[in-house]
Image (spheres, rainbow, N blue to C red):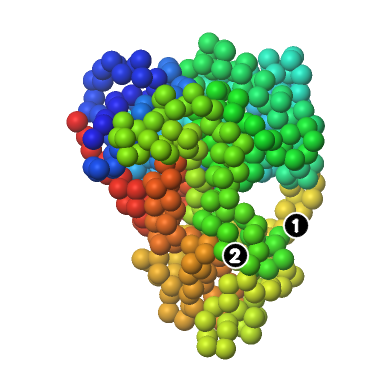
Amino acid sequence: MHLVPVSLFATLAALHVAFAMPYCGLVPPQPQPRSVAQSTGGNTTNGGNSSSPDQVLATGWYPGWLGATYAPSNISWSKYNALTFAFAVTTNDPSVISLDAQSVTLLPEFVTEAGNNGVSALLSIGGWTGSLYFSTAVGNAANRSAFVKAVTGLATKYNLDGIDFDWEYPNRQGLGCNAISPSDSANFLAFLQQLKQDPVGSKLILSAAVGETPFMGANGTPMTDVSAFADVLDHIAIMNYDVWGSFSPTVGPNSPLDDSCAPTKAGSAVAAVKAWTGAKFPANQVKERCISLEPAYQTFLFFFCKIALGVAAYGHSFHVTTSAALGSSGNVNLYPSFDKSQQPLGDSDTSTSASVLDPCGQPEGISGVFNFNGMIAHGFLNSNGTAANGIDYAFDNCSQTPFVYNPTAQTMLSYDDARSFAAKGNYISSNGLLGFAVWPVTGDYNDILLGAISDAMGIVQICS
């Protein structure tokens, strides 16, 4: 096993750093060629920019607005080597990045917990409702300089190890009222290059949460060459979820592993990785840093080692009549029609959710989202994560994801369980991806999902 007692993305030149406290790392047993080394955490001097030849990423996002019910101390820190606090948001002033009052209080606690557990602490900027002003923040040289200063100021103030950019999306509308420009992707790259040259920014882990297709070019289609982004980003996490939902024409898998065999191809992990690598991410220089020392693995590890797969600890609900949901033999139909007007309430929805306004001034509507633990709390699943009594279950062999159906409530859910997380873990390992990123880390129950994906990758914790 190959242990690297440095921050997750420290350069190989920093391997001489000594530690006063016991070092713990996450490693897969032999003959796997890669290890997951945990960081020293809690500082902005980790070096950034590269991983050691055998590291794997185990990370996720912590929603700051859930701090009152899920404190940072409740996180299974020993099973991660980096975690990201979500979210700070962009503002119409590029020199100001905003944190709400709860996050201002909770972020220092999160960073302290991360440092105490040897985990890198990142802060995510953006998100679905926080990306309104990314375009203007990077839109010209003066704004980019102000935004760099704002980012590094946050990193210094909160003693962060890194920054995650969750821009949804460059030159593509997300929420509905985001500023967008044909030059977004080029300007984003210029900003990242400037941030990487900054004395503070050069020492930060820089990551990006990305869609299933590469950043949009000036012509409104995905870029065919995003290799330059690999020079300035330590990794990307492909958000392989919300592929199907209440916005779709029929029920479908929330987070499909594959869709090449699906009746309708809407996106999947396999397709997304193919799209990003086809657009030359990561750049060729990664080969020298990430290639396995094992000859048998050299054919693929160098190419995917800056791509992590985003995995979902939640699912989408749909109102589906029994006749549409169940076949003649009682089996669950996988792509039935549903009634949008009778959207079930998700585990965090209330009767007033539909009238809450988003930052664009439009009603947010009912999300219908159930976290994995919410599915247990609402009786869809047993405490071990299997379908509860009276709940119909099906596993889609194409998407490698499950569906459950409550015939009494006429509610169907598309989600992920231990079996689908294990399938994703196997895919990550067999294809040499960097690792996984869970949204949200608060959605699991007794680490059923986290344990499944970690076990599939052969990850164990060792201390020295």
Q: Amino acid at mark 1?
A: Ser
Pointer 2 residue: 262
The image quadrant where one finds the C terminus is top left
Pointer 1 residue: 355
The image quadrant where one finds the N terminus is top left
- What percent of the width, then of the height, locates residue 295? 31, 35
Q: Outermost residue, left direction?
A: 464
Q: Image check: 413 left or right of 108?
A: right
Q: Residues within 10 Å of mark 1 (few under 14, many from 20)?
A: few
Q: Residues within 10 Å of mark 2 (few under 14, many from 20)?
A: some
Q: Secondary structure at mark 1?
A: helix
Note whether residue 177 is visible: yes
Q: Image check: 378 left or right of 145?
A: left
Note whether residue 62 is visible: no
Q: Write down the quadrant of residue 14 in the picture.
A: top left
Q: Look at 51% across and 27% down and name the residue there.
A: 284
Asked if 109 appears above or below 288 in the picture, the reply is below
Q: Image check: 452 left or right of 344?
A: left
Count up the numbered dots: 2
Q: Look at 57% across and 12% down and name the residue there.
A: 198
Q: Amino acid at mark 2?
A: Ala
Q: Outermost residue, bottom direction?
A: 328
Q: Look at 70% across and 39% down and name the residue there.
A: 222
- What percent of the width, then of the height, locates residue 11? 39, 20
Q: Secondary structure at mark 2?
A: loop
Q: Nearer the viewer, residue 431 or 205?
A: 431
- What percent of the width, then of the height, locates residue 256? 54, 58
In primary-sequence order, the first of circles 1 and 2 is 2
Q: Nearer the viewer, mark 1 or mark 2?
A: 2
Q: Are marks 1 and 2 in contact (CB under 8 Å)?
A: no
Task: Specify the label residue 124 is tagged with.
Answer: none
- What percent of the width, then of the height, locates residue 447? 37, 53
